[in-house]
Amino acid sequence: MLGKLKWSKDISTLVAKNPRGGIDGAPLVVGVITILKQFHSSNTTKFIGYLAQYVTSAVNSERGSSKSSSGTELPPQAVKALLFLEQFCSFSKMSRKLVDGLLPSYLMDRFTHE
């Protein structure tokens, strides 16, 4: 799903790459938050852990590939997942300490909005 989104600097959120795509980042994030609120809080922690694991594996697989030109740029799928996590924390009023504990610090240091 994140592959169908891109970052919009104008409105500071994820938006559909294709205007007819029918999906925007903010409603997607709020929808996921709403669904997770229906369950025990441990499910939210697991979800964030899985996303953090996805980011880490995307970065490691990109680093292992030969087409990686510079070691300072994160792969696009990792950036989108980090943007999703950032909005998730913001919209759910959740402390970012959980995400910081699950992701290596160098990823957050290199993370910038596109």
Image (cartoon, rainbow, N blue to C red):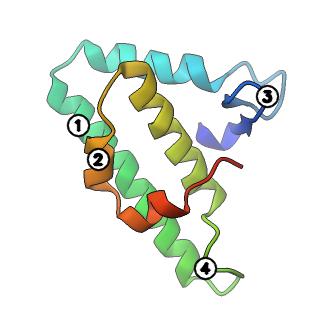
Which of pointers 1 and 4 lies earlier in the amino acid sequence?
1
Tell me if mark 1 has few (under 14), some (14-19) or many (20+) residues whose alpha carbon lies within 10 angstroms of its own. some
Q: Which amino acid type is marked by label 3?
A: Asp
Label 1 – label 2 distance at C-alpha: 6 Å
Label 2 – label 4 distance at C-alpha: 24 Å
State the residue position of label 4: 71
Are the residues flagged by discs 1 and 2 in contact, CB closer than 8 Å?
yes
Are the residues flagged by discs 3 and 4 in contact, CB closer than 8 Å?
no
State the residue position of label 1: 45
**Which is in the foreground here, disc 2 or disc 4?**
4
Which of pointers 3 and 1 lies earlier in the amino acid sequence?
3
**Where does residue 36 sit, x and y in percent of width and height?**
30, 21
Which of pointers 3 and 2 lies earlier in the amino acid sequence?
3
State the residue position of label 3: 10
Q: Residue at x 61, y 26 (%)?
A: 25
State the residue position of label 2: 49
Which of pointers 3 and 4 lies earlier in the amino acid sequence?
3
Which of pointers 2 and 4 lies earlier in the amino acid sequence?
2
Are the residues flagged by discs 3 and 1 in contact, CB closer than 8 Å?
no
**Where does residue 27 sit, x and y in percent of width and height?**
57, 16
Q: Residue at x 36, y 56 (%)?
A: 53
